[in-house]
Amino acid sequence: EETHSLKTKVAAASGHTVVLVDQSDEILKKSTKGIEESLKRVTKKKFADKPEAGAEFIEKTLKNLTTSTDAVAVVHSTDLVIEAIVENQEIKNELFKRLDKFAPEHTIFASNTSSLQITQLANSTTRQDRFGGLHFFNPVPMMKLVEVIKTPMTSQKTYESLMDFSKAVGKSPVSCKDTPGFIVNRLLVPYMMEAVRLFERGDASKEDIDVAMKLGAGYPMGPFELLDYVGLDTSKYIIDGWHALEPNNPLFLPSPLLDKLVEEKKLGRKTGEGFYKYN
């Protein structure tokens, strides 16, 4: 929900007309409030010596933004649909299938999924050539990266439009084929899982592994801190999905310790405890 509204902010702030769609007015109110607060923070820095210009920027950005709970009703007039709903194949397919019936011919569909196959999502529609991945990173206003995912059916024109849109919202796009985890997660998730296995074998403590990667590899967070930040349930969901796709790939093997923590509802920062405890 948060990424969803921050992507909206980034698009609206770069002059795009944006409709933010969610399940209830309550969620939309909360999202809009979050966008306003985020805009205020940005303008404070950006327009430090020109508060009037800052206020004008906020007003202009918010004018570009409307909200709705009816995706079908607003899809009639869109050029690009970016889906950022729950990371569940069936629910996403259902949404795309419905929107595909009502969206104009030229409308491009994109998913912000980080772990599902874009090709399978595209197959729930009749616009496989106008379908790709746009994977943003949290926190969206700060992180410059977008992974633009091209399936074997994505047309060159669609791919170029997605690259252009990413640049227009001030991001640095990289391009990747529709392969599990794309670039960042394909390297990051197995690395985090390998850290858990190292700890499970008793080779090093989690604290020392975190310190080692921060001081030895220059990473801003150690793997256990990162797992807690991402959410252990999310990490488990990703690795389980990949393990089902490629059962013989040792990089994708599940971890008994991770499974146990998720079962105990210790999911990381969001629940107050994961690999570490949080107050």
Image (tube, grey):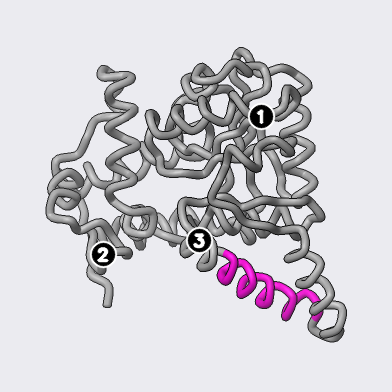
Q: Earlier in the sequence, mark 2 or mark 3?
A: 3
Using the numbered discs, state the Cα–Cα distance from disc 2 to disc 3 in whole angstroms: 26 Å
Q: Is residue 176 visible?
A: no
Look at 71% across and 48% down and name the residue there.
Answer: 171
Residue 142 in the image: above or below residue 102: below
Q: Earlier in the sequence, mark 2 or mark 1?
A: 1
Disc 1, disc 3: CB below 8 Å? Answer: no
Quick one: 31 or 227, which is closer to the camera?
31
Residue 43 in the image: above or below residue 117: below
Tag 3 residue: 25
Disc 2 crowd rating (10 Å Cα; few below 14, some 14-19, many 20+) is some
Place of residue 85 in the rendered image (x, y in percent of width and height, measured from the top left): 47, 44
Disc 3 crowd rating (10 Å Cα; few below 14, some 14-19, many 20+) is few
Quadrant containing the C terminus is: bottom left
Place of residue 243 in the rendered image (x, y in percent of width and height, measured from the top left): 28, 26
Tag 1 residue: 103
Specify the amino acid type for callout 3: Asp
**In the image: residue 92, left or right of residue 32:** left
Look at 57% across and 31% down and name the residue there.
Answer: 99
